[in-house]
Amino acid sequence: MSSASLTPQKKENIKKGSVLASFASNARQYGIVGALVVIIIVFEILTGGLLLQPNTIVQLIQQNAYVIILAVGMVMVIIATHIDLSVGSLVGFIGGCIALLMQNAHLNWFLAIIVGLLIGLLVGVWQGFWVAFVGIPGFITTLAGMLIFRGLATTMINASIPVNNTSFNAIASAYLPNILGWWGPFDGLSIVVGILAIVAFAWTQLRKRAKVSKVGLVPEPINATYIKIAIASVVIAALTFEFASSGNATQGGIPIMLVIVGVLVFTYNFILTRTVFGRRVYAVGGNRRAALLSGINTRRVDFSLFIHMGLLSAIAAIAMLSRLSSASAATGNSFELDAIAACFVGGTAVTGGIGTVPGVVIGAVVMGVINQGLSIMGVDSALIQTIKGLVLLLAVAVDIMSKRKKR
Amino acid sequence: MSNSPMILQMQNITKTFGPVKALTNVNLEIARGEIHAICGENGAGKSTLMNVLSGVYPSGTYSGTIFYDGKECNFKKIKDSEELGIVVIQQELALSPFLSIAENIYLGNERQKNGVIDWEATRADAIKVMQQVGLQENPDTKIMDIGVGKQQLVEIAKALSKEVKLLLLDEPTAALNDEDSAHLLQIIRDLRDNQGVTSVIISHKLNEIAAIANNVTIIRDGSTVGWLTNSKENPLDQDELIHKMVGRELTNLYPDHVSHIRDEIFRVENWTVHHPLDQQRVIVDHANIYVRAGEIVGLAGLMGAGRTEMAMSIFGHTYGSAVSGKVYVHGKETDTSTVQKAIGAGIAYATEDRKGYGLNLLQNIRENALLAALTKHSKHGVMDDGVERIAVEKYRKDFNIKTPSIEEQVSNLSGGNQQKVVLAKWVISNPDILILDEPTRGIDVGAKYEIYEIIDQLADEGKAVIVISSELPELIGICDRIYTVSQGVITDDVQKTKFTQEYLMKGMTQEKTQLKKVGE
Ligand SMILES: Nc1ncnc2c1ncn2[C@@H]1O[C@H](COP(=O)(O)OP(=O)(O)OP(=O)(O)O)[C@@H](O)[C@H]1O
Ligand SMILES: [Mg+2]
């Protein structure tokens, strides 16, 4: 029936979709990126150029790695309309377990890590069981978990357990080895990886475009793709420069923590956007009953989500323990709130069903940059907390307003 | 109040959503005291026009002018239009299921004394307006405990409580059976004759329009394409109306189809289902049905007869408690106690409640349409974009889903087009046995024909199709056999030769005491 297809006039209108329109339609995604750019520029000026020093950036990553690691799991949990309040306590608890294994049981550091990850999985199974199969809301299950594991951590650790294994402590502070040597003042490996990243980004963008037109759909304007590639190249090149010139006399380049975070972000973004499981997570979050009636085992989805969260909590625990070189009962306090804040700043919907991994990574970086910038300026940490709270409120308010306007 | 004969004039209304132009220079004139119908295909822009009028889309987000009672209006929000007596009853009912009838009627408009709700006044006033719409229920009854027909009446009662002058009804009868629809239309007529309420009604049921409207405005692709009048002397020409709506002749309402019926592939025996909360209440009572490959079987019954409940309980026990009975697929007894098992056995159920059970409004067309067939379109758990897009694109064309692209959010689609996405989802899952619950609810005449063709084609591919519909002519037009259902009991198994509305009605209205059960 002809009438159901678009009138010629409408087709015209759509075709006119210029580069600008294509960007405008994704305004929500770009809004937060824009905010990040502004924040970076402001702090770069306020700190007199200290913010974008190579070593400050490395520090920023090493300090905020745990937020990103927890947030990529948290965003999935929130999309599926749950929440996990226990991750902070888990970081303390699992960190304590690993420290005990290494210091008291003298377990090899690598084996200790494996055991730590297994503990994370087990805790995930435990919490997932209560949520998915008993039907206790995630909020309550993990509130209980928060108390249980903080309590266990405190009993187990007493005051603190120092970790003096250099290999383990290197995870959070060392760099990838300079296998390609120093090229002048620059780390060769960083430069090679940077160039590869640019090529890979351009290639995937163009391939995505080709794929879209291959199945007979109208892709975004080619200029939009080029602009995207150009911007990404500049950003990656700048970061490459920063990393290549980071470090000290003996080592420098790409921090190991960046590799771990990068792999996790990449993997979870893939899971959420490209896999059947990811599609199910969104379906469950958007309309649980419709998902159920479409044959999705909603319990299994819930169960898996808490297992992922347990695993990621264990990874965050390892990062934290390595960074602090000691386990203490208070480690991980209020980490759950940092992760949740990163999710909401990054555009995740409070009511579930909406959220992306790149979004929460940017959310985490926004919070991290504000934190770092204010610390460099010597602002009191209590005040920093207040400011972060206001930023969270503002970010979500802007998000809600922009959605209302779209109507 | 001005004395102009026109209560409402909308001039050159244009409304765009990003690149999509939903309305282009639409003009609408409504005379005081008339019942005015708006007709058009799915996605023509009818609901959008009502939203512009009522202030859902605030002034400034569209262009054009609105004169109401002779004065130009720029509504910023719904409350602004309500203050002047314009009340909309939306396409999707907006009642709160857990609140009582009285509470819903005065929701947002509470009877109060010094900031405290005056329950006596609430109840007394509620009873008054309920009487006006002929709703005989206790005002304390919860909305979820009454049927859709009565819920519509609550919506109208709510409108009356706001001293309505212009009542806008967006597909009020889509979910109603003939009897409830007739009742509703009579109330709209009474409101006009006794209280001078002007009504604007949107509907895809053309005989209703012919029965009630004084004038009809026709919209196609976002533009007004014609007006028709309807009176005793000059009755509405439905063929002309259809022609104006779809832009071509439509000679038949139902496609000619000869079924090639083969072996039985689906059988349900002694199916008994109880109410999910009250295990004493029997909802489906020892039902026995069978369907053969290539056969289209209808389930006819009044509202609340238990057809949807029967279908959903078969489909993964998604309704009811203490479900008992046997399901046979291809002659083998089959466990369908979870949705996964039911789908695995080749059964599909397309729901009548698209917002509640059918769609994820936060996802796009592609993601919704594939939800029941994710594993089929993936490799090792990874979705295959290309295959996915090609599959959905094909069904978008087959079902004529009106949208700029399959990447569009389903919440941006018109009601009828959302319905098509639900159907597409289950056709894509490629089942052997397809249960369609009100498949053409809210779908325009032209598109209905195409959906019937798709149903015929599915049958020709050897699938067994069960259609639940509250429109008897539709069942008569497309089915090979019809079961009549009354109060949870299958009362008759009617062969095609005996299809008449009167005969079917007999089976649909049998009282429980004198029921004979079929197939025992
Ligand atoms: N929020 C929105 N964003 C984008 N497009 C929209 C939005 N709302 C409606 N549309 C588009 O506007 C057009 C008109 O939609 P509308 O809901 O008014 O149709 P309708 O005539 O009421 O159809 P139906 O009979 O199916 O209810 C459709 O093409 C629809 O996709
Ligand atoms: Mg509509």
Image (tube, coloured by chain):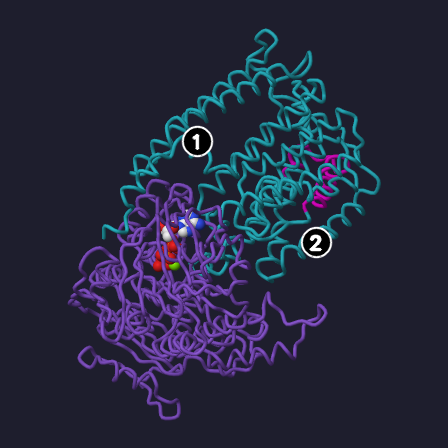
Q: Residue furthest right?
A: A159
Q: Which residue is mark 2?
A: A143
- Disc 2: which chain? A
Contact (Cβ within 8 Å) of mark 2 with mark 1: no
Q: Residue furthest top?
A: A184
> At 55% from the left edge and 63% from the top edge, which residue is drawn?
B83
Q: Residue furthest front?
A: B3
- Disc 1: which chain? A
Q: Which type of secondary structure does the marked residue at label 1 adopt? A: helix
Is residue A98 highlighted in magenta? yes
**Residues indicated by labels 2 and 1 sit on the same polypeptide chain:** yes
Secondary structure mainly formed by the magenta segment: helix
Q: Colour of chain B?
A: purple
Q: Viewer-proximal residue, B440 or B493?
A: B440
Marks 2 and 1 sit apart, C-alpha to C-alpha, by 46 Å
Picture layout, residue B166 above or below residue A381: below
Q: In the image, residue B275 lies at what x, y percent?
A: 49, 77
Q: Is residue B409 visible?
A: no
Spot the cyan chain and give its letter. Answer: A
Q: In the image, residue B39 lies at what x, y percent?
A: 31, 61
Amino acid type, mark 1: Leu
Select label 2 or label 1 by which is in front. 1
Q: Viewer-proximal residue, A245 or B26?
A: B26
Q: Which residue is mark 1?
A: A20
Q: Residue furthest bottom?
A: B514
Amino acid type, mark 2: Leu
Residue span colored magenta: A87-114
Q: In the image, residue B511 lies at what x, y percent?
A: 37, 89
